[in-house]
Image (spheres, helix red, strand yellow):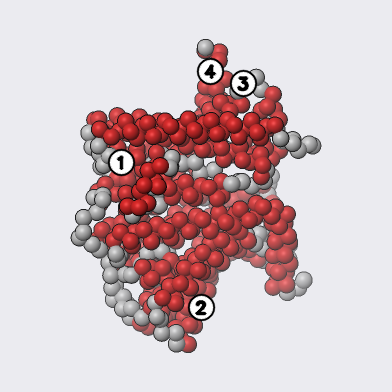
């Protein structure tokens, strides 16, 4: 058990077994996830049927944006449940036990639950992404393939960073702030359309404060081979996903700071 | 007569007061919904910029529709009543069966408070903000306001009847959220929360006209902005009434079925 990866896979297997105890509930949950992201996509279809295009963006292009953000988020969503519970752990004093174990708290929290029912979003987003990729006639050169994989990977890291930040806030507030949902779920809602359609203040916020656009918008332009209406260069579009990774690393540092600040509630 | 309705009004007001305690959750929901509404409004603005063809709804109406939806989001039958869920899980639902009241009416009152109380707290400040700053319009006329209020009462009853049905299905599935995982995204979509229903293709309108869900959001909203003229308001209210009767009758029947086969978990 010395290897963190081995420990993590052990966590996953425990979590999967416990979820499989309620098989019907799991199936309903997965299907429900599929439905709730599915109706969003049907909404997009209906809007394109009505309006034809979205400021020069075609349905297939929007579908590609939609697919990328949903696949990346679904990966994180399976891992990050534990960070939602930090507030509760701090309040009940459970968190002290985590600190006593000779493993990093981040690993323990990621290992807390592998939420399999999020597969619903993954499958739905993946199907849309696949359809868009086939339909769009993208030039799949090795660099574009690599960029796609990196974008999804860095996207997942970025979202994990967001969840870690939400958990970190709990050290101070001792409760999980639902307030932060506006960043996660709101961000995904926004990212299903190209960032260029939004107003300037909004675009700036999701590029410079929370670099969501760097993992959901700029690299996708390079993949699609489209020039950016906002005027960024191709080199920036290739490098942008790294900001998602930086954000993740930064959030780990802030987590450390939070840990140092942590005082047990004593309950 | 008074002693007959007393238990139901008592549970309604008790729950109302209890839910009003959760102010932090209310603020979180409030901010999330403003963010969400802003994103939706910006996306719709972009779609309207893409075409000059006349649309079934003006952009200003769509904006008002979106903000009304955000303000009244809590009225939607999202989930089964959480208290009933816990009772079914722990077995204390048995106590409910021995109470000297009509169980369906009792649960109906309970669920109505469950839907109304959180909405009450969020909707008024959100509507004021949206009216002042975010482009939401005032009601089209005093007449429109009155019919909207009447239709909102209908919407509350429809939504409560659906919530009770969702809660009753827990008696079969016991764990988790039951069928609400599957059904709620569809209700959300068919009520007009994903995109305003008039923007759907014409062939879909005929189906949407028959289903009860239009009465929860779409029809009352359009009465408010005069998109459905006051002359047709009675038809909307009548449509709601028919579905309320059907859903209440179905719920009562389902509950009698459920209590006959109920196995209370011991311990």
Same chain for marks 1 and 3? yes
- Tell me, yes or no, if residue B228 can be seen here: yes
Asked if the residue under mark 1 is in contact with the one under mark 4, i.e. CB atoms within 8 Å, the reply is no
* Farthest right residue in view: B267
Q: Which residue is mark 3?
A: B101
Which quadrant of the rendered structure holds the C terminus of chain A? top right
Q: Which residue is mark 4?
A: B5
Q: Could you classify mark 3 by the number of other residues whose Cα lies within 10 Å: few (under 14), some (14-19), or many (20 or more)?
A: some
Circle 3 SS class? loop
Q: Chain of mark 4?
A: B
Q: Position of residue A156 (x, y in %)?
A: 52, 69
C-alpha span from label 2 to label 3: 60 Å
Image disc number at residue A149: 2
Q: Reply above or below: A3 against B98.
A: below
Same chain for marks 2 and 1? no
C-alpha span from label 2 to label 1: 45 Å
- Tell me, yes or no, if residue B34 can be seen here: no
C-alpha span from label 1 to label 3: 38 Å
Q: Which residue is mark 1?
A: B222
Q: Position of residue B19 (x, y in %)?
A: 52, 34
Q: Is residue A44 left or right of residue A146?
A: left
Asked if the residue under mark 4 is in contact with the one under mark 3, i.e. CB atoms within 8 Å, the reply is no
């Amino acid at each position: 058990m010395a290897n963190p990866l081995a420990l993590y896979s052990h966590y996953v297997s425990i979590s999967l077994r416990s979820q499989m105890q309620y098989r019907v509930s799991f199936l309903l949950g997965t299907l429900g996830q599929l439905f709730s992201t599915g109706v969003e996509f049907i909404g997009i279809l209906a809007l394109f049927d009505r309006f034809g295009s979205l400021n020069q963006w075609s349905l297939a292009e929007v579908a590609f944006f939609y697919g990328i953000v949903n696949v990346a988020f679904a990966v994180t969503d399976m891992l990050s449940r534990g960070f939602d519970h930090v507030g509760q752990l701090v309040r009940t004093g459970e968190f002290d036990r985590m600190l006593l174990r000779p493993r990093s708290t981040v690993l323990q929290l990621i290992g807390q639950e592998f939420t399999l029912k999020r597969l619903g979003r993954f499958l739905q987003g993946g199907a849309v992404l696949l359809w868009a990729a086939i339909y769009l006639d993208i030039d799949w050169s090795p660099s574009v393939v690599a960029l796609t994989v990196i974008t999804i990977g860095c996207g997942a890291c970025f979202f994990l960073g967001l969840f870690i930040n939400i958990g970190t806030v709990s050290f101070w507030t001792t409760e999980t702030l639902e307030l932060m949902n506006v960043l996660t779920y709101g961000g995904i809602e926004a990212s299903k359309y190209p960032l260029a359609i939004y107003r300037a203040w909004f675009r700036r916020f999701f590029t410079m404060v929370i670099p969501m656009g760097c993992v959901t918008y700029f690299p996708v332009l390079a993949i699609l081979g489209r020039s950016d209406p906002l005027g960024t260069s191709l080199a920036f579009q290739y490098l942008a996903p790294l900001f998602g990774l930086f954000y993740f690393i930064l959030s780990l540092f802030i987590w450390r700071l939070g840990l140092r600040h942590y005082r047990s509630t004593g309950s | 007569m008074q002693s007959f309705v007393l238990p139901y009004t008592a549970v309604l007001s008790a729950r109302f007061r209890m839910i009003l305690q959760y102010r932090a959750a209310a603020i979180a929901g409030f901010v999330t919904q403003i963010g969400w509404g802003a994103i939706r409004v910006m996306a719709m603005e972009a779609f309207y910029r893409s075409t000059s063809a006349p649309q079934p709804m003006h952009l200003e109406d769509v904006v008002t529709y979106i903000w009304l939806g955000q303000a009244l989001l809590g009225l939607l039958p999202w989930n089964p009543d959480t208290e009933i869920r816990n009772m079914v899980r722990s077995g204390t639902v048995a106590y409910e069966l021995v109470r000297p009241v009509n169980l369906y009416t009792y649960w109906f009152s309970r669920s109505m408070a469950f839907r109304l109380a959180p909405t009450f707290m969020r909707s008024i400040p959100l509507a004021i903000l949206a009216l002042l700053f975010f482009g939401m319009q005032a009601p089209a006329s005093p007449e429109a306001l009155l019919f909207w209020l009447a239709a909102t009462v209908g919407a509350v009853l429809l939504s409560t009847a659906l919530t009770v049905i969702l809660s009753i299905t827990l008696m079969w599935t016991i764990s988790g959220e039951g069928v609400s995982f599957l059904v709620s995204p569809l209700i959300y979509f068919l009520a007009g929360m994903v995109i305003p229903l008039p923007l759907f293709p014409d062939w879909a309108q005929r189906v949407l006209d028959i289903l009860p869900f239009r009465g929860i959001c779409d029809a009352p909203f359009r009465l408010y902005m005069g998109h459905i003229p006051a002359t047709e308001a009675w038809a909307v209210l009548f449509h709601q009434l028919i579905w309320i009767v059907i859903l209440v009758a179905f719920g009562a029947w389902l509950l009698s079925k459920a209590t006959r086969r109920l196995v209370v978990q011991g311990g």
